[in-house]
Image: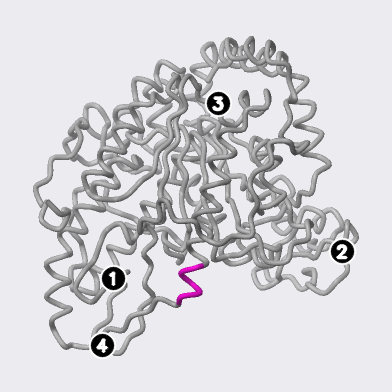
C-alpha cells in the first residue's frame, strides 16, 4: 500500500492528548525558569559532582582536547543578524591582522571575534557581541584544496542546559582535513526555551548556506549532524522546514489553515524565519536523539529534569495545558511533527492533483519526479539515525520507534546501532581511546551523500510544468551499492589526529562516573 492511499494509517503508538487552551507562553519568563532550576539544586549538584569526576578522570584527554581547540585551524565567526547600520564594518578586501584571515562578508554585518577585539565594530554595544552565543567555529578553512570542500554542520548536545560548541572538537579534529566542519553555538535554558534554541540552529544553517563559500566550503554539499539535544534541535529544524513548505502548498491551493484549522489548537504551526528548504541539505544524521518527547518524560525525570523544568524548557507553564501537559511536548517532538507532515501531505494530495489537471497556469512549490507524482520523501534530505544500544539517557527504543514511523510513511532512513555504546561514546569516550567508528561512518555518509548531490547537479535534472522550470530534488533516491566519483580519500586510521589520547582503563572508570 502506498503512502498516497494510506489516509487512515495506524502510526506507531504514542500517548494521546486532549487539546485545551494554555495560558500565554509569556508566563514562562526567564526569572521563573531560573527559579525552576534553583528548586532542584540537590539533584543538579549530584549530577554536577559526577560530571566533575568524569572530567577529572579523563583529564589527560581533555588537556589534548583543550589544546587542540585553542591552537588548531579554527575560526570563530558571528552568525547573528546585523544589529545596527554602523559605517565602520570591516571590508572584505582589508588585510586581516590574524593569520591572514579575511573578514566576513559585510552584506549582513557579520564579524569574527578578532574583528571585535581589534575594534572594527565599535559603533554600539550591540555590534560588540563578544559574549554572544551566536558564534560558530569553522575548522579547516585554511587548509588548501583544489576544489571547495563538503561541509559538515555539527550540533552539539548538552541536555538543553550545558551545550557548547567546544564539544564538537574531537569530531572536527578527526574530519577537518578533508571536510569543512562547522560547529555553531546556541543559547541554552534558562536563557531561552526550546523555541529560542531552534531559532538559533535555524539561523546557523541559513548562515552556512549563504556564506560558507567564503571559507572554502561548498554550499550545495552541506550535511547536518547532531548529537543528543543537538540532534533533536536539528531534527526539529528539518521537519519544521518540511511543514513550512507543505503549508505554503496549502495556501496555493486556497486552504489557509491546512488540516488543523481549529483555532483553539495550541499546536498551530508557526513557520521558521528563514527561507531555505530542508532538501537543500544533502543529508541529516541524528545521533542519540530523543524523538518522542511524550514517551521521554519519565526518562528525563529520572535524569534530574522534573516535570516543571521539562515544561519550562519546552515552553509550557506549570499549571497550563492538559492534565498531563502533553500538548507542550508534542509541539516540539519530531515524532509527532513527522506524523503531522504526513497528515498534511495526504490532505494536500487530492487538492494538488486537481490543480495540476487544471490549466490555470499556477505553479506549485513542490519537488517532483513528474507532473503527476509527488512523494513526501522528496521534501526531506537524506536521513540516517545512529544510536548506542546501551544508552540510558535516551533509550535506543526512541530511534527504533521513529524508524518504524518513517518506514510506515515511506520515508527512507538509514540506521546504525552500536552494540554496547552509551550516550556519549560517539563523541567522547570512543574517540578518546582511538575508536573512530562513529567518525568513520559520518565521514563515509558525507562522502556518499555529497558526491551524489554533485553528480545530480552536473546532470542538471530539470522538468517543466505550465512553462515554469522546476528543479528535481530526489534527495532520497536509492544509491546503495553505487560507487560515485569523489575526490575525498578514505579516512586514514593511522593519521596522528586519530590516535588514542587517553588510556583505556581511565576511559572505563569515567564511563561509571558519566552522568549522561
Look at mark 4 in the image and give the residue it sits on: 466
Residue 371: x percent and y percent? 23, 77
Q: Main secondary structure of the magenta part?
A: helix
Q: Nearer the viewer, residue 161 or 275?
A: 275
> Could you tell me if the residues under marks 4 and 1 are in contact, i.e. CB atoms within 8 Å?
no
Closer to the N terminus: mark 3 or mark 2?
2
Q: Residue most toward the right? A: 97
Q: Secondary structure at mark 4?
A: loop
Residue 99: x percent and y percent? 88, 57
Residue 369, labelled with which disc? 1
Residue 329: x percent and y percent? 32, 36
Closer to the N terminus: mark 4 or mark 1?
1
In the figure, is residue 349 to the left or right of 212? left
Q: Is residue 241 above or below residue 419?
A: below
Magenta-tinted stretch: 455-459
Q: Nearer the viewer, residue 231 or 381?
A: 381
In the figure, is residue 33 to the left or right of 55? left
In the figure, is residue 36 to the left or right of 102? left
Closer to the N terminus: mark 2 or mark 1?
2
Q: Is residue 15 above or below residue 119?
A: above
Q: Tell me the distance, in whole angstroms, between the alpha carbons under discs 4 and 1.
A: 15 Å
Look at mark 2 in the image and give the residue it sits on: 96
> Callout 1: few (<14), some (14-19), or many (20+) C-alpha neighbours within 10 Å?
some
Look at mark 3 in the image and give the residue it sits on: 424
Residue 510: x percent and y percent? 63, 13
> Could you tell me if the residues under marks 3 and 1 are in contact, i.e. CB atoms within 8 Å?
no
Let me know if residue 321 is in the magenta part: no
Q: Tell me the distance, in whole angstroms, between the alpha carbons under discs 3 and 1.
A: 40 Å
Task: Classify residue 307 by image quadrant.
Answer: top left
Q: Tell me the distance, in whole angstroms, between the alpha carbons under discs 4 and 2.
A: 50 Å
Residue shown at 34%/40% (left/top)? 333
Depth-wise, is mark 4 or mark 1 nearer the camera?
A: 1
Amino acid at each position: 500500500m502506498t503512502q498516497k492511499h494510506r489516509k487512515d494509517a495506524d502510526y506507531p503508538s504514542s500517548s494521546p492528548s486532549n487539546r485545551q487552551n494554555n495560558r500565554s507562553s509569556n508566563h514562562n519568563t526567564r526569572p521563573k525558569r531560573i527559579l525552576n532550576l534553583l528548586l532542584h539544586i540537590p539533584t543538579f549538584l549530584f549530577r554536577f559532582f559526577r560530571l566533575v569526576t568524569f572530567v577529572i578522570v579523563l583529564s589527560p584527554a581533555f588537556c589534548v582536547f583543550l589544546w587542540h581547540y585553542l591552537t588548531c585551524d579554527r575560526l570563530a565567526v558571528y552568525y547573528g543578524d546585523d544589529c545596527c547600520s554602523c559605517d565602520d564594518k570591516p571590508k572584505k578586501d582589508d588585510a586581516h591582522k590574524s593569520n591572514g584571515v579575511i573578514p566576513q562578508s559585510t552584506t549582513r554585518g557579520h564579524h569574527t571575534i578578532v574583528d571585535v577585539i581589534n575594534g572594527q565594530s565599535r559603533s554600539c554595544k550591540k555590534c560588540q557581541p563578544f559574549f554572544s552565543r551566536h558564534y560558530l567555529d569553522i575548522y579547516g578553512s585554511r587548509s588548501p584544496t583544489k576544489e571547495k570542500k563538503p561541509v559538515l554542520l555539527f550540533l552539539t548536545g548538552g541536555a538543553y542546559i550545558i551545550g557548547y560548541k567546544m564539544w564538537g572538537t574531537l569530531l572536527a579534529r578527526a574530519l577537518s582535513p578533508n571536510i569543512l566542519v562547522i560547529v555553531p553555538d546556541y543559547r541554552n535554558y534558562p536563557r531561552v526555551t526550546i523555541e529560542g534554541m531552534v531559532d538559533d540552529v535555524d539561523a546557523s544553517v541559513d548562515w552556512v548556506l549563504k556564506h560558507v563559500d567564503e571559507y572554502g566550503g561548498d554550499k550545495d554539499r552541506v550535511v547536518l549532524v547532531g548529537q543528543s539535544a543537538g540532534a533533536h534541535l536539528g531534527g526539529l529544524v528539518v521537519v519544521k522546514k518540511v511543514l513550512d513548505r507543505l503549508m505554503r502548498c496549502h495556501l496555493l491551493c486556497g486552504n489557509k489553515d491546512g488540516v488543523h484549522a481549529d483555532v483553539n489548537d495550541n499546536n498551530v504551526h508557526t513557520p521558521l524565519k528563514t527561507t531555505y528548504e530542508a532538501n537543500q541539505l544533502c543529508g541529516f544524521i541524528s545521533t542519540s536523539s530523543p524523538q518522542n518527547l511524550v514517551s521521554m518524560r519519565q526518562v528525563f525525570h529520572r535524569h534530574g529534569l522534573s516535570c516543571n523544568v521539562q515544561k519550562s524548557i519546552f515552553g509550557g507553564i506549570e499549571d497550563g495545558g492538559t492534565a498531563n501537559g502533553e500538548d507542550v511536548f508534542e509541539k516540539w517532538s519530531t515524532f509527532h511533527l513527522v506524523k503531522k507532515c504526513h497528515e498534511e501531505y495526504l490532505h494536500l494530495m487530492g487538492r494538488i492533483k486537481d490543480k495540476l489537471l487544471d490549466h490555470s497556469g499556477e505553479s506549485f512549490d513542490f519537488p517532483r519526479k513528474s507532473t503527476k507524482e509527488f512523494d513526501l520523501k522528496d521534501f526531506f534530505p537524506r536521513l540516517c539515525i545512529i544510536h548506542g544500544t546501551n544508552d540510558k539517557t535516551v533509550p535506543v527504543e526512541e530511534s527504533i520507534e521513529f524508524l518504524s514511523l518513517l518506514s510506515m510513511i515511506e520515508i527512507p532512513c538509514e540506521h546504525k546501532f552500536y552494540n554496547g555504546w552509551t550516550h556519549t561514546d560517539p563523541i567522547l569516550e570512543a574517540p578518546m581511546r582511538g575508536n573512530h567508528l562513529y567518525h568513520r561512518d559520518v565521514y563515509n555518509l558525507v562522502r556518499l551523500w555529497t558526491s551524489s548531490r554533485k553528480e545530480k547537479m552536473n546532470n542538471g535534472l530539470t522538468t517543466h510544468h505550465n512553462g515554469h522550470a522546476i528543479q528535481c530534488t530526489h534527495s532520497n533516491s536509492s544509491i546503495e551499492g553505487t560507487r560515485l566519483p569523489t575526490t575525498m580519500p578514505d579516512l586514514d586510521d593511522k593519521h596522528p589526529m586519530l590516535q588514542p589520547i587517553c588510556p583505556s582503563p581511565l576511559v572505563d572508570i569515567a564511563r561509571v562516573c558519566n552522568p549522561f
